[in-house]
Image: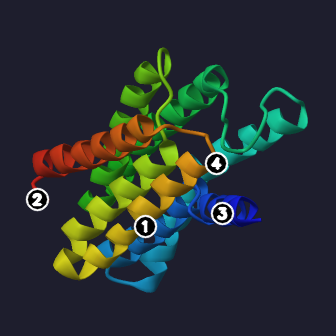
Amino acid sequence: MQIEMRKRIANLTSNILNPFLVSLVIILLLSFESTPSIVDALKWSLILVVISILPVFSVTTYLIRNQRLDDLFIGVRKQRTKIYLLASVCALFGCIILLYLGAPLMLVATFVAGLSAIVIFMCINLLWKISLHTALIAASVTVLLILYGSIAAITAVLLPLIAWARIELEHHSLAQVTTGALLAALIVVVVFYLFGLV
């Protein structure tokens, strides 16, 4: 009974703190933080969602319905390749669109960090699976710390929580969640430093 309860909590945690939802929250926060008006924030939020989250979510859902992927979070390493490729194209296209439209620097830096992470994770995925759940939470916590300072440190509690959930569900090992988190945070720091935001 206790094991079943732990699995339920871990599953709920994974579903709530999933990459799609976390990405949406970060896009909204960054859009509202880096623009002068609500209209601008909504405009950038819509653009970013349409060029990043929506295509990946739509294709993933389509492939699941056609039994070409096992689940939304793609537990099988080899099945991740096509989604990584799609996400890379979306992120690259997103960077170009943001630069062309003169997006706020914070949004451009975030998309460049995202593109960098996707390419690096895609290469690692050829041999080994790392946790995208923990990677995205770690990247988000890092961005929020850069943006809001020490007040955002409270969000760091999400990192061990999602790491525990992924390990508890046996989707990842301790090494996989740790590597995902450390790499994602490092990529954000390096990219934001190069953009002069750190």
Report which quarter residue 79 is drawn in: top right
Q: CA distance from mark 2 to mark 4?
A: 36 Å
Circle 4: element type = loop
Circle 3: element type: helix
Query: Relative to 48, is 176 above or below?
Result: above
SS at mark 2?
Answer: loop
Name the mark nearer the viewer: 2 or 1: 1
Q: Position of residue 24 (x, y in %)?
A: 54, 64
> In the rendered image, which residue does mark 1 sit on?
158
Q: Which residue is the extreme one toward the front?
A: 1
Q: Amino acid at mark 2?
A: Val
| Between marks 4 and 3 in the image, the one whose residue lies nearer the viewer | 3
Question: N-terminal of the two: label 1 or label 4?
Answer: 1
Where does residue 34 sit, x and y in percent of width and height? 30, 72
Give the CA separation, mark 3 to mark 1.
Answer: 17 Å
User: Are the residues at dot 3 and dot 1 in contact (C-beta closer than 8 Å)?
Assistant: no
**Foreground residue among 72 and 44:** 72
Vertical arrangement, residue 13 with respect to residue 185, above or below:
below
Q: The C terminus lies in which quarter of the figure?
A: bottom left
Depicted 39 relative to depicted 54: above or below: below
Chain-order first, disc 2 or disc 1: 1
Q: Residue at x 51, y 75 (%)?
A: 42
- Find residue 116 and name its label: none
Rendering coords of residue 117 (x, y %)? 37, 37
Seen from the viewer's position, the closer of residues 194 and 140 is: 140
The disc label shown at residue 169, or none: 4
Display coloring = rainbow
Q: Amino acid at mark 3?
A: Arg
